[in-house]
Amino acid sequence: MQTRRLGTQGADVSALGIGAMSFAEFYGPTTDENSYAILDAAMDAGVTHIDTSNVYGMGRSETAIGAYLKSRGQAARDHFVIATKAGISKDADGNRKFDNSLDHFEAELDKSLERMGIDCVDLFYMHRYDASRPIEDVAEALAALVKKGKTKAIGLSEIAPSTLRRAAAVHPIAAVQSEYSLATRAPELGLLQACADLGTAFVAFSPVGRSFLTDDPIPVSRVSDLGFLKSNPRFQQPNYDYNIAATKPFRALAADMGMPAASLAIAWTLHKGDHVLPIPGTRSTAHFAELVQGANAVLSDSDMARIEDVLPVGWAHGDRYNAGQWVGPERYC
């Protein structure tokens, strides 16, 4: 497994990571034992990067990771580089809000450390930006956690290139996380470039297009049972059917190239920059093997051209978020 670095001063990690939102039933039912099987497979494959958050299943994802580390011992803790996040909260009425204060970050990180049974995380992100607070103040709050020894590095999620540059002027930003795949290419309009300029890793979530870029897309019959997807524009009709049809040639191309569609989607993402690190999530060890296959694949320039010929920029039907889901992520183009 090839490795890449989390920022200029961060840890070396496997080019492929694990998005542990799937450990919290975001895309369907799972068990802790199933999550352990994914982590066992990761250890066998040399995958070292785990990405989670305090709000994934309201702590369930972190609790599963902590139980796994406890059951497997020090070898597992030494193997994995762990990232988590905070910054999403609720007001007195239960409505979602964003809190980028040091008090919130530290209190939530302390809970995360307790759930995972560790003393320090390798990377701690601001999960969503509270734009009423200067990003310089947010960077200082995150940097304070480095000084306290509770995280080794800091990151930002779903932010604009200009925001990244301002934050990086205060403290090195090891990683920026945002959605990026053949289905969502907005980061190419400045964010990938800003990360490269600053030596910041770009961590790509949903790199297989929330299943559209696989051989087994989530069937429309299941969408209504999935809280996020049932109101997501790309999974609502008629967009769902359009997107299934639009990605059919990609699945055929992957088969022609001798690999599963998910493998090809991961290989494409990794080919977009040496600082790009995809973190797909999965509840299936068979699907995880496809993701690992993609991380080990080598694509030529002609391969990339063939891929982008069948899925050119802008092919997807529907926005990546609905109006409510867009509250928090920064738009910059």
Image (cartoon, grey):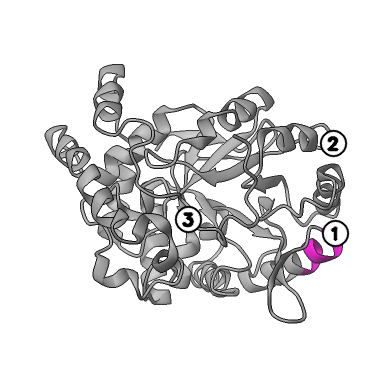
Give whichever of 174, 190 is nearer the camera. Answer: 190
- Label 1 sits on residue: 102
User: Pointers 3 and 1 in contact (CB under 8 A)?
Assistant: no
Q: Which amino acid type corresponds to the residue marked 1 in the rendered image?
A: Leu
Residue 295 visible in image: no
Asked if residue 25 lies in the magenta stretch, the reply is: no
Q: Earlier in the sequence, mark 2 or mark 1?
A: 1
Badge number at residue 19: 3
Q: In the rendered view of the protein, which quadrant contains the N terminus?
A: top left
Q: Residues within 10 Å of mark 1 (few under 14, many from 20)?
A: some
Residue that extends furthest to the bottom in the rendered view of this protein:
93
Q: Quadrant of residue 309?
A: top left
Q: Amino acid at mark 3?
A: Gly
Residue that carries the numbered disc 2 in the rendered image: 170
Quarter holding the C terminus?
top right
* Location of residue 107 with respect to 93 vertically, above or below: above
Q: Nearer the viewer, residue 209 or 220?
A: 220
85, above or below 224, in the image: above
* Magenta region: 101-107
Q: Find residue 137 and report its horizontal and vertical position in percent.
A: 87, 47
Amino acid type at circle 2 is: Val
Secondary structure type for disc 1: helix
Instruction: Give the mark nearest the N terminus, 3 or 1.
Output: 3
Q: Residue furthest front?
A: 238
Marks 3/2: CA–CA distance: 28 Å
Query: Residue shown at 54%/30% (left/top)?
Result: 275
